[in-house]
Amino acid sequence: MSIAGNVGLTDLPRICPLISRRVQPSVDAEETRVVVVGEVQFGGVRPVVIAGPCAVESLEQTLAVARAVKAAGAEMLRGGAFKPRTSPHDFQGLGLQGLRILAEARRETGLPIVTEVMDPRLVETVSEYADMLQIGSRNMQNYPLLIEAGKSGKPVLLKRGMAASLCEWLGAAEYIAKEGNLDIVLCERGLKAFPAGEYSRNVLDLSVIPAVKGETFLPVIVDPSHATGVASMVESASCAAIASGSHGLIIEVACIDEGAARPKCDAAQAISPETLSNIVRFIDTHIERTAMRKAHAV
Ligand code: PEP
Ligand code: MN
């Protein structure tokens, strides 16, 4: 399964021996490490759907979205309490209050929480509330942050840098692994490559999924929301990601039709809970078909 020998990948066993399939002979060629978050399993039979708002804006908004995504079949809740924004004048998230709101949403729905941490000094605090730490695209190579996330012992969702090579991405994961934490889930979220920005926010690199699987046993998921930036593109990008072997999806959802305010962050890419249900149904069908194909093969 390895694509060893490809230009640029030959250095991987040296860069990231702890997570390299080629260096860890104990891990079977086809096997993925199962990363457990509460009752959720990344890398198991069923792709995991994480959904929720881009940012935690209020208790009401977060609870409404959390209930809706749970009803649509999501297994985990996302939502940023600390938001990386291009302008320092834009909404930066509710911080600690946002973390408390997420904890309340988990208490009510039972959904485990993934939320972003941007500052190494805040890893301890965010870890008190979150079930999984998200390291965002902009911070993929923030090495002190990766080290703190590794030390926290929490499962980590490591997004790919928006212009990062596979070597750089897996090298970042190795920093977490070096602290003794192998509970890492990789997340492809689109690249700033031509023609990003023309008709979609980024360019979704689906070929990286089999490439990741060839080089590491860590599970890999896809974020179709930031990859496309356009709500009408999210369903097809999600289905394509699942068909490409993604171990899950992380999707931004808003309940705008219920009279709620337009999201302060990334409103253009937020899908409705109904569209999320369609994606979950696609996954159900995909799993059934895969099981049938396997049964016919034996
Ligand atoms: C996010 O998921 O909220 C986010 C900011 O994503 P990214 O780091 O991929 O831009
Ligand atoms: Mn967002």
Image (cartoon, grey):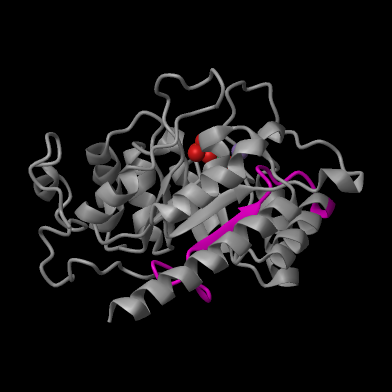
Q: Is residue 88 visible?
A: yes
Is residue 266 positioned above or below 95 on the image? above
Is residue 136 positioned above or below 182 on the image? above
Residue lying at 46% horizontally and 40% vertically, measured from the top left: 189
Count of all numbered marks drawn on residues in the image: 0
Position in image of residue 196 (x %, y %): 48, 22
Q: In the image shown, does 276 or 60 lie closer to the viewer? A: 276
Tell me the quarter of the picture where residue 103 sits.
bottom right
Residue lying at 49% horizontally and 73% vertically, measured from the top left: 288
What is the quadrant of the C terminus in the image? bottom left
Residue range (magenta)? 37-60
Position in image of residue 143 (x %, y %): 32, 40
Tell me the quarter of the picture where residue 218 sits.
bottom left
Residue lying at 60% horizontally and 46% vertically, measured from the top left: 235
Q: Is residue 124 visible?
A: no
What is the quadrant of the N terminus in the image? bottom left
